[in-house]
Amino acid sequence: MRNLVGYLIRRVGWMLLTLWIVYTVSFVLMRSVPGNPFSSERTVPAAIERQLRARYNLDAPVHRQYFDIGWGIVSRGDLGWSLRLEDYSVNQVLAEGFPVSASLAIFGLVFAIGLGIPAGIISAVRRGSFADLSMMTAAVLGIAVPNFVLASIVILLFVFILPIFPAAGWGTLQQLVLPAFCLGAPVAAYIARLTRAGMLEVLTREHVRTAMAKGLSPQAVVLKHVLPGAMLPVVSYLGPATAGVLTGSLVLEKIFAIPGMGSHFINAALQRDYFLAMGMVLTYTVLLFVMNSIVDISYAVIDPRVKLQ
Amino acid sequence: MNPPLLSVEDLHVSFQTDEGLVEAVRGVSFDLGQGETLGIVGESGSGKSVTNLALMGLIPRPPGRIDRGSAKLAGRDLIQMSQKELMDVRGRRIGMIFQDPMTALNPLMTVGQQLTEVTRRHFGLSRAAAQTRAAEMLEMVGISAPESRLRDYPHQFSGGMRQRVMIAMALSCEPEILIADEPTTALDVTIQAQILELLGDLQRRRGTSIILVTHDLGVVAGICDRVLVMYAGRVVEQATVTELFASPRHPYTLGLLRSLPRLDRDHSLRLEAIPGQPPDMTRVPAGCSFRARCPVALARCADDTPPLREVATGRSSACWHDDARQPAGVASISPDPSPVAGG
């Protein structure tokens, strides 16, 4: 327990340091790309651009901006105004988009874990069987097929041919199913492959033979003596994968008309929306840190030889 | 004489490998009496471990296969049993401990969880009763503060202590037979002696029959009653420990005994290793498989495989020399007429 508190304190310390570095690097990178938020297809008259720059404090010297924006984030948690989504603060954009992306992600992950782990177990136990071959082929397809192709296929199948689900939109459970499936499919495929590889590795260990020699049933041996060890690589994959899935997917949000965060991520960068891009990058950093800490803690829970540090 | 507890008859086990079919066990037969400690000696690949895994139904299939033979435990053939029936034998009637206690215990479970698992499975004990039983067993194998140690994980135990845990686990359902597969090989020498002493002591107190697989003749001399010497998948000699050390019949046994370091021998002499290598098990030559390394091989050894025959009461050997040989035994081919029991 004291271990855990110390670990968490250290992690938060590292996270703050990392956030500062990420902030600095993002700031420098964004300001050094050619162009600015107001240079788009339509040229803005010089006087208006001057006013806009003044409005967003972009006319101040760069080092001033660096400190002012940073101070705003640190003191008030204020990430500033979005330069392209008028009348929205970055905090508002995140507050609206994150719950949407997160609920989609949670459904996708539950589906991915619920499908991937049993598939991996069966594949490993029945190695070389038809079930193994077909599931691993499906897994390779799940990883290789891009999500817009998968999305088109499921829309074709379950919206047009068999009209079970709505094509797009957000707000009902039915609308969640298809995008969650498309989001979770590659994750499920990775999990299945990692579970299978982990199981096959643990199955060769001697303690499995000991468990067999005790007279335990094959099911008990697999579930109690093989699976926990086989989960370690899955757990380490799930950390960053969850962070990635939580921040949304531009493609799926576009196809299924979902108001999530994924599109902001890309658009903010393309449109040089300095403040929104910064907000997205910092959010992603925090998520990644939190997920990796959960991975570390899970490791220590699964394997008592692992010490948190 | 009582009927044997375990009677293995003409056991054949083979493995399909990339290099071809390996006949790991080629016709092994032996009996194990009630309360007896039987040593099975041989170098790596001689089939001693495979024989025991076959008894437990733990040969991985594929690539392994039991081609022939029977192993009757109190009249019932283990080889013919279904996996379900074998599950009731494993851990309950035959306990097994393995070579490396570092890897034979599950590193992710507490010792208590691993110990209680067996008694809950076979005796249907409640969690609490299994816990009490586990603590008793740990105490029996000489682990102090057993209640608190049940909560520890294997990595918190030393090698010798882990082997004690393994023994406690294997014996907690009071099996009739304990198979110990190289139980001391991975341990420090001082710990080896303690573990052997513990095994001998438990055996005397509980009357468990033990099959002790080892390549160490010193271990055999220490606690076994009878010994099987295996070479290339066959039993080449079978005798009581005293007989084996006093007058080995098979040239391979003799070679093994000669290669033991001894304190009473002139140190300027080198240890006598058996020349050559065991045969490639994918291409075992016809005839006696020890022929190529045998100092006294005859012409007929190349063609005919010498069968394991009784050469005196209760002892057998598989060597053509036994045909012509007088009671003096292998002594006639031995320049050192008094191999002394080591260990």
Image (tube, coloured by chain):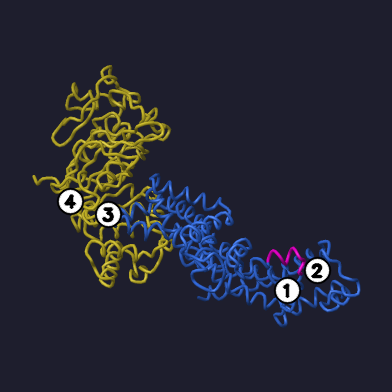
Give the quarter of the image for residue A228: bottom left
Nearest the camera: A173 or B158?
A173
- Check the rendered structure and report the hue given to chain A: blue
Q: Is residue B304 left or right of residue A191?
A: left
Which of the chains bears the disc numbered 3?
Answer: B
Q: Mark 1, mark 4: which one is toward the viewer?
A: 1
Instruction: Measure the C-alpha gap from mark 1 to mark 2.
Output: 11 Å
B299 sits to left or right of A263: left
Chain B on-screen colour: yellow
Q: Which residue is mark 2?
A: A37
Q: Which residues are magenta?
A: A265-273
Q: Which residue is mark 4?
A: B35
Q: Residues within 10 Å of mark 2 (few under 14, many from 20)?
A: some
The residue marked by circle 2 belongs to what chain? A
| Residue B90, position as x, y percentages in the image | 25, 53
- In this view, the residue in front, B91 or B214, is B91
Q: For this rendering, which residue is in front, B314 or A226?
A: A226
Dot 3 surroundings within 10 Å: few (below 14), some, or many (20 or more)?
A: many
* Pair 1/2: label in front: 1
Find numbered disc 1 in the image and state the secondary structure of the residue it sits on: loop
Q: Badges 1 and 4: C-beta atoms under 8 Å apart?
A: no
**Dot 4 alpha-carbon crowd within 10 angstroms: few under 14, some 14 to 19, many 20 or more:** some
Measured from the top left, where is residue A20 in percent x and y? 72, 71
Which mark, residue A85?
Answer: 1
Main SS, magenta region, reads helix
Tell us which disc is closer to us: 1 or 3: 1
Gap between marks 2 and 3, in whole Å? 81 Å
- The subunit carrying tag 4 is B
Amino acid, disc 1: Leu
